[in-house]
């Protein structure tokens, strides 16, 4: 039987009082967000809570909002680890405008920071993202009027959505 890995269930966040990074088990008690580490509980900022993704490479777990350097044989750059609700799994987001994502398994990645825990990391990714935008002035295909009307026709929808989106 495999040994229990308690780190798999941990979160990390910044404390409310002094922005100290704490790592442990998350609980919500009487509307307070708390990270427990041993017998010590610390109040944390709920906007900085980063859950363990369960993805482990080179004996290191990745957490939500980790800023990573990725590389393949043809490409390299920065990305953020985020949960993709459409695909129900963690993925890499390559820029701030959500125009490009990739499967974590396909890339060599190394953690270089965390955008939820460090403003400098967020600024670094924002600056990088400006140069990486794939959809400048282009409406995302999934929200385009043409695609929505096409889908409406597939489902025999009576009313087109063109005026609704304007």
Image (cartoon, grey):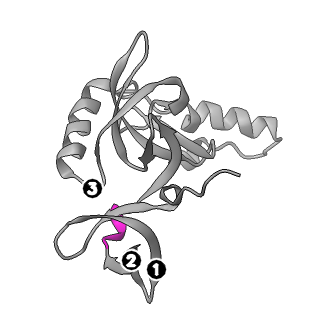
Question: Regarding mark 1 in the picture, which secondary structure is present there?
Answer: strand
Q: Are marks 3 and 1 in contact (CB under 8 Å)?
A: no
Q: Residue at x 58, y 35 (%)?
A: 142
Q: Is residue 113 left or right of residue 99?
A: left
Residue 72 position, x and y percent, is: 43, 16
Q: Which residue is mark 2?
A: 34
Q: Are marks 3 and 2 in contact (CB under 8 Å)?
A: no
Q: Earlier in the sequence, mark 3 or mark 2?
A: 2
Q: Is residue 92 magenta?
A: no
Q: Nearer the viewer, residue 97 or 59?
A: 59
Question: Regarding mark 3 in the picture, which secondary structure is present there?
Answer: loop
Q: Looking at the picture, does residue 124 appear above or below residue 117?
A: above
Q: CA distance from mark 1 to mark 2?
A: 6 Å
Q: Which residue is mark 3?
A: 117
Q: Which residues are magenta?
A: 44-49
Task: Please identify, in this view, whether the residue under mark 3 or under mark 2 is nearer the observer.
Answer: 2
Q: Which mark is residue 28?
A: 1
* Furthest residue in direction bottom, as rendered: 30
């Amino acid at each position: 039987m495999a040994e229990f890995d308690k780190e798999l269930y941990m979160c990390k966040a910044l404390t409310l009082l002094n922005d100290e990074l704490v790592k442990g088990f998350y609980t919500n008690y009487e509307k307070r967000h708390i990270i427990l580490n041993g017998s010590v509980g610390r109040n944390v900022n709920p906007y900085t809570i980063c859950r363990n993704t369960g993805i482990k490479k080179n004996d290191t777990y990745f957490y939500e909002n980790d800023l990573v350097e990725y590389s393949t044989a043809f490409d390299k750059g920065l990305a953020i680890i985020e949960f993709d609700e459409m695909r129900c799994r963690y993925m890499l987001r390559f820029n701030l405008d959500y125009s490009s994502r990739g499967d974590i398994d396909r890339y060599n990645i190394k953690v270089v920071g965390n955008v939820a825990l460090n403003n400098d990391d967020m600024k670094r990714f924002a600056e990088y993202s400006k140069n990486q935008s794939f959809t400048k002035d282009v409406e995302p295909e999934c929200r385009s009027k043409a695609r929505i009307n096409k889908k409406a026709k597939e489902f025999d929808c009576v009313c087109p959505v063109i005026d609704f989106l304007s």
